[in-house]
Image (cartoon, rainbow, N blue to C red):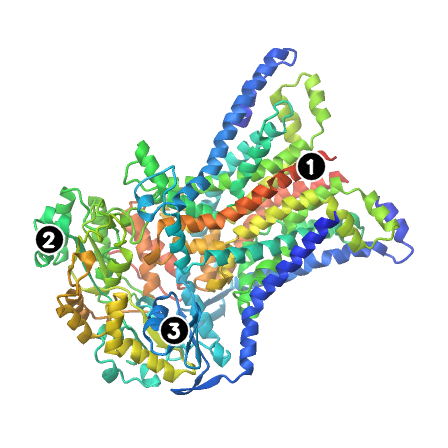
Amino acid sequence: MATTELLTNKQKPQYEVKKSMSMAAIKVIAYIVLVLLSILCLVWFYLLIINATRSHAEINTKFAFLPGKSLISNWKKMNSSSLNFMRGLINSAIIALSSSILTVYFSMMTAFAIHAYRFPGRKFFYVFILAIMMIPTQVTSLGFYNMIVNTFNMKNNYLPLILPSIAAPVTFFYIIQYMRSNLPMSLVEAARIDGAMEVGILNRIVLPLMRPALAVQLIFAFVGSWNNYYMPALLINEPKKRTLPILIYSLRSAAEKDKDLGVQYLSMTIAVLPVIVVYLIFARYIVGGVALGGVKE
Amino acid sequence: MKKVTKFLSLVLVLAMVVSCLAACGSKNESKNDSKEPAAVKTEFGEQGKVLNIYCWNEEFKQRLEELYPGYSKVDDATGKIGDVTVKWNITPNENNAYQQALDNALKQQGNANADDKVDLFLIEADYALKYVEPNVSLALAEVGIDVAKDFKNQYTYTQDIVKDSKGNIKGTSWQGCPAALIYRTDIAEEVLGTSDVDKVQEYVKDWASFEATAAKMKEKGYTMVAGFDDTYRVFSNNAKSAWVKDGKVQIDDRIWEWVDQAKKFTDNGYNVKDSLWGDNGWKSGFDMSGKVFCYFGPAWFIDFCMNCSEPGSVGEAGKWHITVGPEGYFWGGTWICAAAGTDNEVLIKDIMMKMTADTDTLVKLAQTFSDFVNDQPAMEKLAADNTVGNKYLGGQNIYGILAEGAKKIHIDYASAYDQGCNEKFQAAMKEYFLGNCTKEEALENFKKEIKTLYPELNTDDLKVK
Amino acid sequence: MSETTNTNTIKHTRLGRNKWGYIFLVPFFVTFLVFSLWPLIQTIYFSFFTKYTTQMFEEVEEFCGLKNYKEIFSADTMRLFFNTFVLWIIGFVPQILVSLLLASWFANNRLRIRASGFFKTVIYLPNLIMAIAFGMIFYLMFARSGPLFHLFENLGFITGDYDFWAHVGSTRILISSINFLMWFGNTTILLMAGIMGINDSLFEAAEVDGASQFQVFRKITLPILKPILVYVMITSLIGGIQMFDVPQIITKGMGNPAGRDIFKTSQPAIKTVIMQLSASISKSNNYGSAGALSVVLLIVTGILSFFVYLSMVHRDDNDK
């Protein structure tokens, strides 16, 4: 669809007027497509929030574009439910924050090791990391589950969900790409001449230079961990330690006695909204960071 | 530049500290505890200091908090009975999580500290037999209860469910869950010309009449039932064989009878083409605007599941009534078991006696929580009481019909695999009802699901009937 | 650049500063060994055993050779891979097309899309929504008791007894729509970074030579984007084969509705590879068949991404 639209707008450069007209046509199409896609992206959250303010019976019987009046009663019902979403929010935040920071920092460290030093086996390590990038985490999940549950007896512990994020081949790959075009070795050399330690160089020279890439990867890693249902669902079953994805799955198969649609929509709003808010604050930084990463050559 | 580094490292440190606290909190607690003596003197003599209760919801907790003498609530997850700390280990039962948590805890029962051991755990009928084995739970006799004497008022089926192969009773329940057919009086009036319980019963007294009535409902634009599996338990409770015998899965003729009925009902439009508890119309009959004539369920179903307090619901209008229906059956219930290895036998005995065999407490339980309690004289008294009426049922006294049903329930054919088999069989057959596959294919899919769930079972002999 | 490093440090030790290369690799590789490699070895080991815990707490464990593989290497498992692939491809094709289009618009200096920051922010937004919540939202919205169901019914698109979740086609399309919505913004941002990296002088030169928009896109943008497209494809493929959350919550882990597709018998058509794996691990501790399935999954992933991997190494060589 992308190419055909552009194809119909073939033009010869010497006819400046015609060219700008076809440009205007593309522009109109672009805006229409963008607005439609934006609506498609946002309508779910709008409906989610609208329905969080409606009662079970209202949701059950008809569609509405405007909010209802049951927000407070839904809130009360939600808080008296055994699914503690507020607690889940904190649990998810702890895990996602710790693991995303570990991911970003250690991926940078690994990338720096491969990029800035020459040592025997360097090439091998690089290719090796690229090779294991292909392994889905689920492939090792049986052994992982067995090790955590049967060997270490660490069910319902967050560390098995956080520590493995130190080794993140995909993040490493992205950062080393960025490093190649954005880390002048002359800066590193200059710091060495000034007597800086290698760890210091990593933290004080490389990290700030990598900031745009790190910010983007931090968000990606955070979202990845925040969204993660598979591993936590296997390892966590203590109610107080459940993360948001586990709680949301519980809604689907919840004990039917207190299955209230208004409460379900409100619970999901609670789970989704904070991230949206945080994202809106950081969004410019992410998008800007991506642009910055590309322009420098 | 520096700011970011500092910020990142600060956040990192904070996050690690918080997660460590969260992760290790419980461990530290138990370490501190283990230095103190594990036993305390109570009015019951020397008893374990901590009573660990494993369950999947608040039901038993609420009842204990409300009615057990001397129980004081500390917080949501702890309580005190004298010097004994009651610790609630609640794992909601989604996705089999409760049984997993319980199994894990029971597996470590041998090595665990006295204070971490499971003392009391709750189970449901569908998997009760899994937990009656000698190394898992104590027979009631072992905690000092004489079932024949102490529990003589209980409905016998509630004891059959937790009977092991040697005839020992391994658990007890405060509840009976006899179920009945719940119908809408206004629809009965319109289609059958009567809403009187005895007369309506004539129209649903056996499955042939039930089907004939379903056709009448269809003519007037109503559906007889809501879901495919609304009648499932009525058939499965009256089966003549268990799901599993000697490691082989078998399907009773009564179950196949259900399959054929549900398929016919689906094709003829006698149901709303949704599963029990489904979000695709099963609940639509709870509202006056709905078109469903009847549901099947016990007392808790009416009180907690039919949205009866919602405005516009049939229950709020008082238009439900119950009648015995084609066959008697039960649905639900919670049993209390003493874990093998507990150090709180005496306390457990007292809890069991007070909560499941003390008529005064049980009457209060019935009044406070609308439970159909496990005490025959108490229920018969309530059945005879004309002032006791359920407002959702237009003031009908349901205890008579339910108590009559409860006495007729016999559980002769149960297996430890019932829950998984019921669940997987219903899910597989739903695709047959919907026309997505044939009956044979549905059975094949069921076999595969069972292989994943219970690798030890043999499904080779299963054939469509 | 590396020569200067070497001459400066060669006096102290043979490796000099370069030993820090090893030191900085330690956290990654220790983590990998403990949390990935050792579990992987165990997984492979288990795949040769019949190993499970029965309902009655008995532990069964015996060596069984290739039995698990034979059982798993059947039409049933092929079906799981097929299901997963179908769900992935229905979402991925529109995802990559729309993302290319959007990225080329955003990066086009002469088009000058206004409020592009807003649009980029909005299209990335769905990516933040946990898949399981997105699945739940869709499930509730399109169930017969759902607001969107009511809307479509009122608009006359469907009748009151239609059921989105009872048909293979509608269920697949809805699940893939979620994947599309979640990932097209992410892909757009990644592609945009690539397009913006293209030197403006290239475009200017093309313009002077009289190249059309489409020619510029095909001859300049696409070739330069190829590596990043490949990257997008790998990550999407890896993500696709791990598809789990959305079908899991929508079908409550069952993978129904059943459908025939290209297979002889009707089976759950929404059940993905990982749904089966997860059920084997958690529901029954069925380690043997879970292990074999993991290994099959590893091999399939490996085959699928091998040529991509080669192209990446090749590209890496060109960089030097």
Same chain for mark 2 and mark 3? The answer is yes
Residue C140 percent across, percent down from the top left: 38, 46
Label at residue B121? 3
Extreme residue toward the right, this view: C11
Residue B112 percent across, percent down from the top left: 50, 78
Circle 2 is placed at which residue position? B195
Gap in Å between the C-alphas at discs 3 and 1? 59 Å
Label at residue A292? 1
Same chain for mark 3 and mark 1? The answer is no
Relative horizontal placement of residue C35, taking residue A125 as reference (left or right): left
Point 9% across, 49% down: residue: B192
Gap in Å between the C-alphas at discs 2 and 3? 43 Å
Amino acid type for the residue under numbered disc 2: Ser
Gap in Å between the C-alphas at discs 2 and 1? 76 Å
Amino acid type for the residue under numbered disc 1: Leu
Mark 3 residue element: strand
- Give neighbour class at mark 3: few <14, some 14-19, many 20+ (Cα, 10 Å): many
Which chain's residue wears label 1? A
Q: Is residue A56 above or below residue B416?
A: above
Does any portion of residue C69 appear in the rendered image? no
Label at residue B22? none
Mark 1 residue element: helix
Mark 2 residue element: loop
Q: Is residue B440 above or below residue B45?
A: above
Question: Closer to the observer: label 2 or label 3?
Answer: 2
Residue B386 percent across, percent down from the top left: 12, 66
Residues at marks 2 and 3 touching, judged by CB atoms closer than 8 Å: no
Which chain's residue wears label 3? B
Point 41% across, 52% down: residue: A75
Which chain's residue wears label 2? B
Relative horizontal placement of residue B311, taking residue B7 as reference (left or right): left
